[in-house]
Image (cartoon, rainbow, N blue to C red):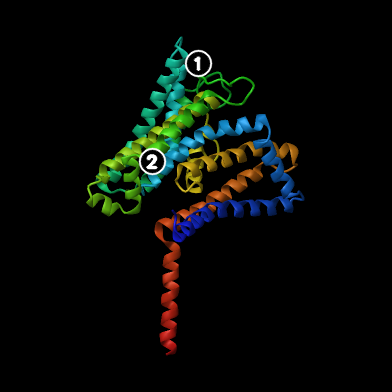
Amino acid sequence: MKTKGQNNHLGVKALNSVLPVILAFVIGGVIIAAIGENPLTAYQVMIQRSLFSVRGLTRTLQLAAPLLLSGMAIAICFKANIFNMGIEGQLIFGGFMAGIVGNCLVDMNPAAHKLICFAVGILCGMAFALIPALLRAYFHVDEMVVTLVLNYAMARVLEYLASVVFRDAGAGYVATPPVQDSAKFFLIGTTRLTPFLFISVIIFAVMAFVMTKTKLGYTITALGKNPSFAEATGLRSRRTIIVLMLISGALAGVAGTGQMLAEKTFYTLDFSGSPGLGWDGMLIALLGRHTPGGIVVAALFYSALKTGSEAIGLYANVPNEIVAVIQSLMILFLAIQFFDERYGLTERLKEKLAAQKAGSEEGRA
């Protein structure tokens, strides 16, 4: 039975997740009103077209597939106080190489072809995650800085490979050749769903079980709450750091491969979208408070926003860029919240103000 203190703590966590969303929508509503449109009408169109029509709902569910995995890839590290900011780089690397394999192998059995593509994507995601993992585990290098830098390095490398080495000569823009039909995930019936959605849900469910019901999951929680205590009690944080980073990279590789085989089918410079599936995953993990249930809700919500952005310009006379503004505001507010939680900015400010107040009172005395 939960105590009053536990209920209050859960209430604060829920408020911390909901407040950035409310603020983003309020500011978005002000912008919509400023251009002479009704914000409530615009938001109603977004909800109806993304959740209350068969076409919209199935599209929302399909777009949520890679977001579930990228959100879990972020959460499994963040919950252990390991800040893997390189999901985007690991995702696009896995997706790129899966696309190359998907194109080069011909006359393959469809199931075998897809399995090979996923294996390549997973290995590439893990390999790219291993670099910051080793630096953090053995040399105590800040993984946040390393992974952020590696993201942009990987984006530039893949831009070169797509522009020069693997460029599709028949395309009028920078793109790799499309994957073979045997590697593609096709739509199911008349829906907007592909089998990748079910693959992602199964993998997500397995990882949710690992996070909540296994020894590794308890170790993740212990590392996140008190790394020094976890090390002292024999939880071998160095080994755990490497394992978690590899799992995170593997999830990113699956997300990138699924995006390639189910959605894009060839690599372009906007393969991951804007700001990118990896960055979207960070927002989803923060919104979901790094819990499996929260990630599911956040992924569906964020995916509905994306689906709604495709309809808002057609049915509400509002530029669909307003959704990008709302997404950016949520990222901003959640980033502020994240840095506050990591570095205790609010507590430091309170202590400074308290010290100043005590000093002024002593001066008056």
Density class for disc 1 (Cα within 10 Å; few <14, some 14-19, many ≥20) is many
Give the residue at x 68% y 41%. Answer: 46
Measured as percent of width and height from the top left, residue 64 is found at: 54, 35
Measured as percent of width and height from the top left, residue 301 is found at: 58, 42
Question: Residue tagged by mark 1?
Answer: 180
Residue 215 placement, left or right of 157: left
Q: How many marks?
A: 2
Question: Residue tagged by mark 2?
Answer: 211
- Nearer to me, 155 or 170: 155
Measured as percent of width and height from the top left, residue 95 is found at: 46, 28
Residue 206 placement, left or right of 284: left
The kind of residue tagged 2 is Met
Give the residue at x 42% y 25%. Answer: 97
- Of label 2 and label 1, which has the lower sequence position? 1
**Occupied quadrant, residue 213:** top left
Task: Please identify the residue farthest to the front as the structure is shown.
Answer: 1
The kind of residue tagged 1 is Gln
> Which marked residue is nearer to the observer: mark 2 or mark 1?
2
**Occupied quadrant, residue 228:** bottom left
Tell me if residue 167 can be seen. yes
Marks 2 and 1 close (CB-CB < 8 Å): no
Dot 2 falls on a residue whose secondary structure is: helix
- Nearer to me, 297 or 315: 297
Give the residue at x 60% y 34%. Answer: 60
- Nearer to me, 293 or 158: 293
Dot 1 falls on a residue whose secondary structure is: loop
Give the residue at x 63% y 36%. Answer: 307
Mark sitting on residue 271? none
**Occupied quadrant, residue 115:** top left
Tell me if residue 158 can be seen. no
